[in-house]
């Protein structure tokens, strides 16, 4: 007799909560639910990022062990971005009585489950949700979920306050760079913005400015690069200080739907920025692309984003597929969700800081351990 199928949840957690993850897994197993937990379930010789992507794609949903550490963890945030991109439900299990800050955007519409009390009931609710997401019927010998008691007015009010706080945090992302950003990263971002301003000055000198001159100033490719996932990429237009001469140029997930070449034509009579973005404005289809094409500041940020992404792509040799997927997910779920120019300016600046900071981290790790990737 064939054994009944069991749903599997991807457990997203901070490393400090690894023992909690194992405890939750053991409890869920009694309800017929399996768990995928890193780093334990990464196969020998398997790339960590590839294993994460495959596990999220194959699991019924993502169980987030939410605490103050996971709220600030860039690795947890990337896992939630991948979950959003794969259209996987996120089940937040709250381990501490705090309100999300960095993860508020991804958890604004999630149904919370508290681990603070009645843990058996919490496990039963998670298991029921896992079977529902997988389209499976819980096994007959699974521990039954206790009927949820009617919440008291104080509990209802607390839940409403939590949800309102999450929505408020999601709507009010901080405009400044996070406190954890290093001085070196801020200096690099400042230099990058200075290069973007120089490119704008060169471009405004007139139509006789050679494209190669602009490309050299911005470190941006003149020729179109391949879209993520095609397996083809053009050589970089110029090698930055942190790139290797033989490294392929990074594909640009932020580019428009059909081309990544900068637009240098006047186009329609509609308002156009003087700085060309990394895509053809004549083919701009989304509201965010149209805003970029109409704003000098957004167009400069778009080019700066391409620079930051490409330089990170060149050093993240074993993580390029994950990086391309994450960047595409950010574009669709964060940038394109902005209703106006102010929101786009804020999230694009924040993303550039994140990309530059991750590149710096990789280079520092490589310098301290040359044999490690």
Image (cartoon, grey):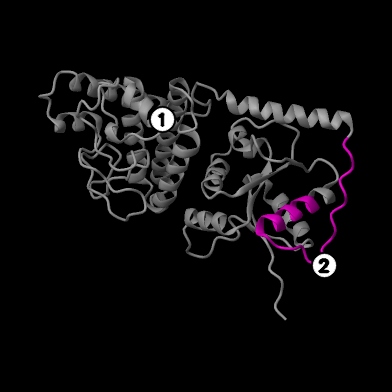
Helix, strand or loop at mark 1: helix
Q: Nearer the viewer, residue 182 or 147?
A: 147
The quadrant where residue 104 appears = top right
Q: Quadrant of the N terminus?
A: bottom right
**Location of mark 1 (residue):** 288
Q: Which residues are magenta?
A: 123-151
**Camera sees residue 301:** no
Q: Are marks 1 and 2 in contact (CB under 8 Å)?
A: no
| The magenta stretch spans residue 140 | yes
The image shows residue 347 at horizontal and vertical percentages of 47, 28
Mark linked to residue 330 = none
| The magenta stretch spans residue 302 | no
**Camera sees residue 52:** yes
Sequence-wise first label, 1 or 2: 2
The image shows residue 294 at horizontal and vertical percentages of 33, 22
In this rendering, position of residue 113 left or right of residue 292: right
The image shows residue 363 at horizontal and vertical percentages of 38, 41
Distance from Cα at disc 1 to Cα at disc 2: 50 Å
In this rendering, position of residue 38 left or right of residue 313: right
Q: Judge whether 151 appears above or below 135 on screen.
A: above
The quadrant where residue 56 appears = bottom right
Helix, strand or loop at mark 2: loop
**Location of mark 2 (residue):** 140
| Residue in the picture at 53% in, 25% down | 179
In this rendering, position of residue 70 left or right of residue 311: right
The image shows residue 45 at horizontal and vertical percentages of 47, 64
Task: State the residue lying farthest toward the front.
Answer: 269
């Amino acid at each position: 007799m064939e054994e009944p199928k069991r749903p599997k949840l991807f457990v997203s957690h901070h490393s400090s909560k690894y023992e909690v993850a194992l405890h939750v897994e053991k409890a869920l197993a009694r309800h017929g639910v399996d768990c995928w937990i890193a780093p334990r379930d990464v196969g020998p010789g398997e790339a960590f990022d590839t294993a994460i992507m495959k596990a999220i794609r194959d699991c019924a949903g993502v169980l987030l062990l939410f605490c103050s550490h996971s709220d600030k963890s860039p690795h947890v945030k990337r896992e939630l971005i991948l979950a959003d991109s794969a259209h996987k439900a996120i089940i937040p299990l709250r381990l501490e009585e705090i309100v999300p800050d960095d993860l508020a955007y991804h958890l604004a519409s999630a149904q919370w489950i508290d681990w603070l009390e009645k843990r058996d009931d919490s496990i039963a609710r998670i298991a029921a949700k896992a079977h529902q997401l997988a389209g499976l019927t819980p096994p007959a010998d699974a521990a039954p979920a206790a009927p949820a008691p009617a919440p008291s007015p104080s509990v209802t009010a607390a839940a409403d306050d939590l949800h309102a706080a999450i929505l408020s945090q999601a709507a009010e992302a901080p405009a400044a760079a996070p406190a954890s950003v290093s001085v070196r990263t801020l200096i690099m971002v400042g230099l990058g913005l200075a290069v973007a301003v120089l490119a704008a000055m060169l471009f405004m000198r007139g139509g006789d400015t050679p494209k190669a001159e602009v490309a050299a100033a911005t470190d941006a490719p003149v020729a179109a690069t391949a879209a993520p996932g095609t397996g083809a990429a053009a050589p970089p237009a110029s090698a930055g200080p942190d790139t290797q001469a033989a490294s392929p140029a990074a594909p640009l997930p932020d580019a428009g739907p059909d081309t990544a070449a900068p637009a240098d034509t006047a186009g329609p009579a509609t308002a156009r920025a003087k700085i060309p973005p990394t895509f053809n404005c004549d083919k701009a289809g989304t509201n965010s692309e149209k805003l970029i094409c109409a704003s000098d500041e957004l167009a400069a940020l778009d080019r700066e984003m391409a620079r930051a992404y490409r330089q990170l792509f060149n050093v993240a040799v074993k993580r390029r597929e994950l990086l391309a997927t994450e960047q595409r997910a950010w574009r669709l779920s964060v940038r394109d969700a902005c209703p106006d120019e102010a929101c786009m300016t804020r999230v694009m600046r924040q993303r550039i800081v994140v990309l530059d900071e991750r590149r710096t981290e990789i280079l520092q790790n490589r310098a301290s351990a040359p044999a490690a990737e």
